[in-house]
Image (cartoon, coloured by chain):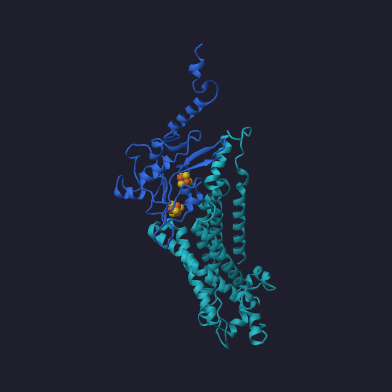
Amino acid sequence: MRRILFVTLIMFLLLMAAVYSAENDTVQPIFSNSKYNNSIENYKIITEHFTGEWQKYGEPFTILQKEYVRKIYFWILIAIPGIFVLHYLVIGPKKFPHEGNKYLVFTVFNRAVHWLTAISFLTLTVSGLIMIFGKYFGGGSLVRTFRFIHFPSAVIFVPLGLVMLLMWLREMIIAPGDITWFFKFGGYLSKKTENIMPVGKFNPGQKSWFWLGTLGGFVMAYTGYYMYSFAASTDNLRIYAIIHNFLGMAMLIMFLVHLYMSLFAIKGSLKSMLTGYKYEDEIRIMHCRFYSKLSGKDCSK
Amino acid sequence: MGRMRFLCDVDRCIDCGGCVVACKEGHQIPVGVNRRRVITINEGKPGEKSISVACMHCSDAPCIAVCPVDALYQREDGIVLVNKDVCIGCGYCFFACPFGAPQFPKGNSFGARGVMDKCTFCAGGPAENFSDKEKRLYGQNRIAEGKAPLCASMCATKALLAGDADKIANIYRERGFKRGSGANAWGWDKAYNKK
Ligand code: SF4
Ligand code: SF4
């Protein structure tokens, strides 16, 4: 988890650096003695009438798009699942016999919101990736169809994301110990379940996915809307496209982590989001503080 | 083969809009799409300048670099064309282009914009030369007929030059030389040079 965060941070710093690096490249007029008969001055004004300052935003957009975006997405899709395969083979999944009482952790409402959001999010991710790797699908009507799906999926995602934000807001607020959790990967790098650090209903990994998924999702929707509608200056469209494509990387990484944890790394996790129930033994270890609150019992191992 | 280029002489363009109309009419371009535009600065003031701009058919074209589906390509003579069967209408070429050349007509599905349309240098498109499909999707193919682009051909003041890079650069250089001050100014050779 720490490595993923580190990589994400580096990518954002690179992005910021790229956006601002062209700052000093604007052409300075060579002759400034005549206000009206100065072609360089005139050319500058003319250029502004077309698409703003290309050197400042157009060029960084072009370079990022040409050299980095598709490559980074490719490596995310290769490296992250690769890390998971290693984790699965070396450390293995967490299994619980699922004994004792079961507790209703996710209400019908929770589950409905979760799954509807999940479906729209999955559609957004898949259609987005197909566009990024569009040339390998030959472009044309197939890829175009996925582009047409991308927008309505976002229209469905945004209100659901908003409901989800309000629904879990309280439980997702950063709690003491959450930062240290990250530095120790929450104990997930150990084979022994006893090393899992005590957390509440949601662990910091889940929390960061929650915040990135909702707030990040809204930023994606905002920037995406303008990329779709063109209702902004060209320079702004360029900035929005850069944000959209790089924030998308962070969201893809976290989405893959979420998929791995829920489908493979913690057995029964998927089932709990379907039925709403979690078993006592699992909650006691994986969500210690939440267990104490639910049962009134101590969860010490 | 030469390298095709456009050159607009801002000292000659008078904002008559003829190039825009010629292009729209000649290629049957839908309403809302302008492959060529004329803009004027300092309008009505001393120093007013107009310029006509379409796709410049750039070397190392940014639009080609960013297209996610490789719908854009550059011919050997430098002309940049779009394959409308491949384009998905994402708009990235518009973000990348320094001249705002790529245009997007309204599409049929969900009101989303359709595939990209831009100046073809009157060279049609990837469809077979002079085919119905080429005409419908990309317009006339005057280059294949051995003619210059419509816009430049009809330009009344010959401000807009289109063609082989070296040739049009020479024309422009000569013009600049002739209209320069001093011995090169109009009429000077006849008026003052006889003894
Ligand atoms: S569309 Fe724009 S970037 Fe592409 S060749 Fe034409 S002027 Fe250059
Ligand atoms: S709009 Fe079409 S030509 Fe332009 S970048 Fe997108 S797919 Fe390529």
In depth, the one of A1 and A25 nearer the eye is A25
Examine the image and state in which quarter residue A207 appears.
bottom right
Q: Is residue A197 left or right of residue B95?
A: right
Looking at the image, which residue is at 59% across and 64% down? Answer: A4
Residue B63 can be seen, yes or no: yes
Quadrant containing the C terminus of chain A in the rendered view = bottom right
Q: Position of residue A149 (x, y in %)?
A: 44, 65
Q: Is residue A17 above or below residue B141?
A: below
Q: Is residue A6 above or below residue A18?
A: below
Q: Position of residue A225 (x, y in %)?
A: 51, 61
Q: Position of residue B22 (x, y in %)?
A: 39, 42
Which of the chains is cyan? A
In depth, the one of B66 and A177 nearer the eye is B66
Q: Colour of chain B?
A: blue
Q: Is residue A65 above or below residue B165?
A: below
Looking at the image, which residue is at 66% across and 68% down? Answer: A183
